[in-house]
Amino acid sequence: MAKRMELKNLNVYYGDFLAVEGVDMVIEPRAVTAFIGPSGCGKSTVLRTLDRMLELTPGGHVSGEVLLDEQNIYANNVDPVRVRQQVGMVFQQPNPFPTMSIRDNVLAGIKLNARRMAKAQQDEVVERSLQGANLWKEVKDRLDAPGNGLSGGQQQRLCIARAIAIQPEVLLMDEPCSALDPISTLAIEDLIQELKENYTVVIVTHNMQQASRVSDKTGFFNIEGTGKPGHLVEFDQTEKIFTNPTQKDTERYITGQFG
Ligand SMILES: Nc1ncnc2c1ncn2[C@@H]1O[C@H](COP(=O)(O)OP(=O)(O)OP(=O)(O)O)[C@@H](O)[C@H]1O
């Protein structure tokens, strides 16, 4: 588990609109990479290229390459469904299937991929995934209760359990804490630190303290103005980005002068 990803001269389009231009970046395995930058600079757009979810938006397409351990995931012979088995996504709004039980929520991705599994093996996946998402202790006595009976923070950890149940290599998180209270946010941030031992983690966040707390590397994206493409301004060790950035715009952004 945990694979390296590499973006090579990546351009991302919605129809004719060039939303993000010329991104080159190596995303290291067993590390957390954060994407920061002002609204509209393309953080979520780039994130969605990493599991080919971008193509689910009409007109969404890319040029350039996205490598997952040397394999271009946009090559003609690559099945996007297979990519999404290797690269999982956790969204801003916790989105468990509301009436489905906690147990079935964890197994949802596996069932969707039509993998048959004996009950004992399912039990093992449910426990392992919930342990991995730091939720097991809180829910082990009510696995058959509906997913929407959990708190927001627990629901987000359930979504993380669902994402890791299929044993991906990479976990993408699009502002995973923005709908959560501060205590649940800290629980997810602690969990992200644990997840990086086994996964390649990429997180989009508006919260600069969060980026500096949880990530090893940070990419700062920016946009010159409405209708212009976003681009990657600077990508480096998180500590360097937040203490001694090379680019003036990065410094202006992290010191709150715009954005
Ligand atoms: N479905 C879409 N169709 C057309 N254009 C889109 C679509 N989604 C995003 N865009 C455009 O792509 C650009 C990048 O948007 P994106 O949402 O990736 O930025 P972001 O940095 O994640 O912003 P935010 O921080 O506000 O979420 C913007 O100009 C946006 O308007």
Image: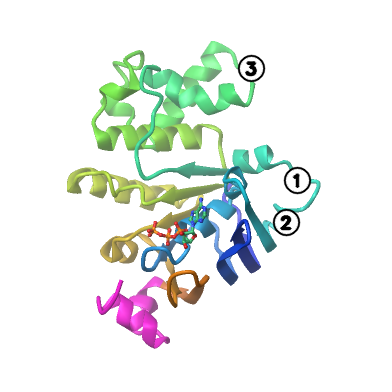
Residue 72: which numbered mark, if any? 2
Task: Name the amino acid, label 3.
Answer: Arg
Say whether residue 167 is left or right of residue 203. right
Mark 3 / mark 1, whichever is N-terminal: 1
Q: Specify which label sits upstream in the sequence, 2 or 1.
A: 2
Q: CA distance from mark 2 to mark 1?
A: 8 Å
Label annotation for residue 116: 3
Foreground mark, 2 or 3, reads: 2
Q: Amino acid at mark 2?
A: Asn
Secondary structure, mark 2, is strand
Secondary structure, mark 3, is: loop
Q: Nearer the viewer, residue 230 or 168?
A: 230
Q: Residues within 10 Å of mark 3 (few under 14, many from 20)?
A: few
Residue 32 in sight in this render = no
Residue underneath mark 1: 78
Residue drawn at the location 40% of the way across and 34% of the way down: 159
Indicate whether 229 appears above or below 124: below
Percent of width and height locating residue 242: 33, 76
- Location of residue 108 with respect to 30 vertically, above or below: above
Label 2–label 1 contact, CB within 8 A: yes
